[in-house]
Amino acid sequence: MTQTSLLFVTGNKNKFSEAQSILKHVGINIKQHSHRPTEIQSKSLHNIARHSCVQALQEVNQALFVEDAGMFIYHYNGFPGPYSSYVLHTISNPGILKLMEGVKDRTAVFRSVIAYGEPGQEITLFEGRTLGSISRRLRGTHWGFDPIFIPQEGDGSTYAEMPIEMKNRVSHRAKSMAKFANWMLERDGGST
Amino acid sequence: MTQTSLLFVTGNKNKFSEAQSILKHVGINIKQHSHRPTEIQSKSLHNIARHSCVQALQEVNQALFVEDAGMFIYHYNGFPGPYSSYVLHTISNPGILKLMEGVKDRTAVFRSVIAYGEPGQEITLFEGRTLGSISRRLRGTHWGFDPIFIPQEGDGSTYAEMPIEMKNRVSHRAKSMAKFANWMLERDGGST
């Protein structure tokens, strides 16, 4: 299997650690590049990831990928969506639980979009989605919205209650990374 | 008094109408240019406005200004702040009121930042701030957060309950526009 090493441009250690753990199983080694490019305001994770990837390429000028993720609550028209990080730093999980009081439809989808680019090439996007629901209280301690998101494919645990190996099988990020990895491996297989 | 006409780049009709009404008193005529430049994600209205102004200048190549505004709730670390528009389209005013249930400190500040630019010149920024508090229920009908924001300088009415002439005396936007107008008039006075 080809040993590939490429840059994951992210300022988020947890994100990097998840990606590293998922990708090493398929022989893809990644390095963290901590500089975070300026993100644009958009309702589309695709646009945000694409724009960040283009920005990062201009600075780093080598093969790299970025990832943008968000949790979209159906009842609230997709809130907090692309602004998940900002919402975590302001109203945070208690704020989300408060907003969900008395709301019957607790459905949410977690989405991850990876944008991969090489200098002078088109950007390629990979998306992973995991459907689930918002818990009624904080369960487990982990980063982000993990303590309040219950993926449908799991055993009723929140992301935060799952062993990381289980989260890395069902999560939105696991899915986008798997698509990305397959594409990389097929491409490298075809070109060698 | 110099008759000046310049472009206000905004997709928001209400914003344009307020700006027009405030600025016409000092002899500044503005035209709306509806194209909305891509906004960046930032906690700083200054950065967002500056970036939008630079983008708009690249496209339009004539004297213009943009404005970015946001309502910052103290208890929630400034939420929704620069993402006010997105929050209005998702959890909206009822969501904000829900978040404020049981919260003692209902203080919020409304901020408006104008970025003015001419081709080849430095961008100039003007800020207006109005301190106030979040009401306990929706009061009045108007756009944005107007039905839930009670400015301290008023008579206890929300922005939405005030006649527009009163809002245009106490509002964050009235203040940023006044600073902008004074600067324009002094500059033009000095150069003729």
Image (tube, coloured by chain):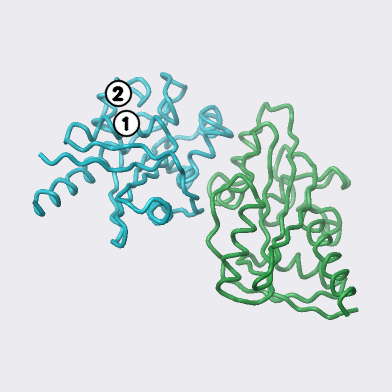
Chain colours: A cyan, B green
Q: Is residue A176 above or below residue A123?
A: above
**Are the residues tagged 1 and 2 within 8 Å (C-beta)?**
yes
Nearer the observer, A58 or A173: A58
Within 10 angstroms of label 1, few (less than 14), some, or many (20 or more) residues?
some
Nearer the observer, A16 or B103: A16
- Image quadrant where residue A170 sits: top left
Of the residues shown, which amino acid type is indicated by label 2?
Ile
Image quadrant containing the C terminus of chain B: bottom right
Discs 1, 2: same chain: yes
Left or right for B6, reference B57: right
Residue B128 picture location, percent across and down: 78, 52
Q: Is residue B172 above or below residue A161?
A: below
Residue at 10% over, 39% down = A1
Nearer the observer, A120 or B131: A120
Image quadrant containing the N terminus of chain B: bottom right
- Image quadrant where residue A130 sits: top left
Residue A32 picture location, percent across and down: 36, 37
The mark found on residue A155 in the picture is: none
Tell me the distance, in whole angstroms, between the alpha carbons under discs 1 and 2.
8 Å
Q: Which residue is mark 2?
A: A164
Q: Chain of mark 1?
A: A
Q: Which residue is mark 1?
A: A18
Q: Earlier in the sequence, mark 1 or mark 2?
A: 1
Residue B168 picture location, percent across and down: 82, 59
Judging from the image, what secondary structure is the residue with disc 2 in? helix
Within 10 angstroms of label 2, few (less than 14), some, or many (20 or more) residues?
few
Q: Chain of mark 2?
A: A
Judging from the image, what secondary structure is the residue with disc 1 in? helix
Of the residues shown, which amino acid type is indicated by label 1?
Glu
Residue at 73% over, 58% down = B125
Residue at 22% over, 45% down = A179
Q: Is residue A58 above or below residue B5?
A: above
